[in-house]
Amino acid sequence: MSLQNSLSVPIYVIDPHRVFPEVPSAKQITSDATRPVASLVIFVAYMLSGVGLTGVYADTPMEQIDAEITNACERYNVEKEFVFEWATSLLYPVGETFSDADREKFIPKFIKAKGWSLRDYQWVKAAWCAYRKGSIMALGCGLGKSGTATAAAIGAANSGRCRSTRCWIIAPLNAMPQWDAYIEELKGTFAEVTCLSMDSAHNAVGLQRGLGGAVIFDELHKLKADDSRRGDACETIRNAFEWGVGLTGTLFHAGAEGVLRVQDMVLPGLSRFLNKWKFGDVFESTYEKKVGKRTRRTIGMPADAHFDRFTEYMSRGVCSLSFDSPEVKDAVQMPGRNSITVDSWETPLWARERLVKLTKQDSRNRIYWAPDWITNEQSAQYLGALALAMSEFEPERKLPSFPKVMHAACKEGRVNRVISKVYEEGKLEPKFSFEYDPEVAASVNVHDVDSLPPGPKIAQVEQWLEANPKEPMILSSVGNLGMYMLAKLLMKHDVKFEIIRGDVDKKERKRIVDEFEEGKYRVCLLQQAAGAESITLVRATTSILIDHHWSSSIYTQFMARNYRIGQTEFCEHYDYQFGTMQGQVIRRLRRGELFDARVRGQLEATYWNTSVVQVLKAG
């Protein structure tokens, strides 16, 4: 039997619980695996653990198994030596790391290029990650992941965990500038240091094998999609390096499937579940959802009954810290953060009068607040679908699965207008049209954004600016229309500001951040996805979102732009909510944040308990 003759991956049956006690007992057949290199590494770990083989390999001579592993490594373009080292690393107990003496010897404490020393929690986590062949550093946003990862990579090379031939950093384009100083630091250890954009990773999939070295994935959660080209490319690149670490402040926002994917990104086999449906079965997290007219099966995070087991399962490959961790509190005195939802707007008098007039004509007539991302006339059918989805909505029901409706709901309330649904006499279908405040209706041109009247959200921002004339702040919107209306408002009040959007290059981005911190302007206006990462704006104590990106990771990351190391004042964050749908959107985003915090707390407790037990045994 040859692995090269198998359909996709080696076909064998294992019981992961016999190798990894924290995984629920459920036999797995690797022909169902979605990541063949991970499957191969798990198989080797299974053999190295001393557990007897089952299934088709039960009576196979070890020489033949070894030959087939060799063939598989050739087929999947991965070094056999790496596979065995990775498999060994999978078997390390949770708390296993360098001794204190070895940590002093191998892990640098001082980052010369930055001119500062690692805090104790960074030094400990760097040692833990350096000791393993692959791991995830899920440190909260603003806790110094880049410096910690740099020390870990240098420590891995110093201790022989990887060769000093090369170190690659794969990061989103927006995050690349922050690595400049760390690249200089890494050049003192590695012969070649390369920083590569995630979106360019597909150009590097043919890099030379056998050289080994270290690879660092920054903002790892961005590689969570199983069917993305950049994710597949990064997975291929990983196979050419001996050692790897993934950095993320929002790992568990990625969802269960994303967590499985990114674990195998940093160390093939680290997820230890060979496909998502097996994960869904053992953690009872499989459910169905409607997408349009189709019903699809998907998986979510484990239910409460399985939560402890899930975090135990995660603990071998993920080190996690938040600002609430005892380790961090001992090293960093951080002021608090308050999150406030502003929802004080009522339907204006003109709209109420319009509704009364319409319902007198026909009781079926209605008005709905229009999604303000629509800036030109749309078909009646489309407007009707949006109106129904966003207004005839009950809080206890699940959100509609129509993506554009969701995004529209996040962006409602910036423009002061409604959709009128009017049943005309003798007609079965209603007519939909835009309605504006009669005082401005004559001057409105739906094709000209300058003529659109500002809605209650923009008015609320204006009130805040007037009430706090000197306070620096971060202001954000998702789309171009919101950014434009906010910029117009700031210019109206002669407020100095700068804008960071997706088209701002890294030099300009750095200049804007530096000048804000120096006090050269008062407001930093961020387009949400572009400004939610790799920016430090601790001069601001207030951040406001007038609408919300659908991703909970972007939501959490945005709020960490000012609440991070270096902040000395109490921070407030404002969510501007307008309507029932937006309230549900915000609750959903915060649910992701709360789950992330809960898993972090459990992982940190597991780590501390394990460490205490080891100390007692050593004593």
Image: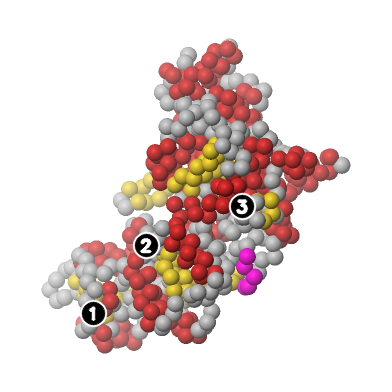
Q: Amino acid at mark 2?
A: His
Is 323 magenta? The answer is: no
Residue under label 2, please give it: 407
Q: Secondary structure at mark 3?
A: loop
Q: Label 3 amino acid?
A: Ala
Which of discs 3 and 2 lies nearer the camera? The answer is: 3
Residue at figure coordinates x 49%, y 28% from the top left? 209
Residue closest to the eye, 548 or 475: 475
Labelled pair 3, 1 in contact (Cβ < 8 Å): no
Residue type, mark 1 in image: Val
**Mark drawn on residue 220:** none
Q: Which residue is mark 3?
A: 113
Mark 3 or 1, closer to the camera = 3
- The residue wearing badge 1 is 444
SS at badge 1: loop
State the CA–CA distance, disc 3 to disc 1. Answer: 55 Å
Q: Residues within 10 Å of mark 2 (few under 14, many from 20)?
A: many
In the image, which residues are magenta? 566-570
Identify whether 188 is placed above or below 549: above
Kindly report the distance in space between the C-alpha atoms of the residues bearing marks 3 and 2.
42 Å
Which scheme is used to colour this image of the protein?
secondary structure
Task: Depth check: give the residue in front, 275 or 413.
Answer: 413
- The reply to whether the C-beta atoms of the residues labelled 3 and 2 are less than 8 Å apart is no
**Pick the front one: 600 or 81:** 81
Earlier-in-chain disc, 3 versus 2: 3
In this rendering, the answer to whether 298 lies above or below 80 is: below
Task: Give the residue drawn at x 55%, y 16%.
Answer: 65
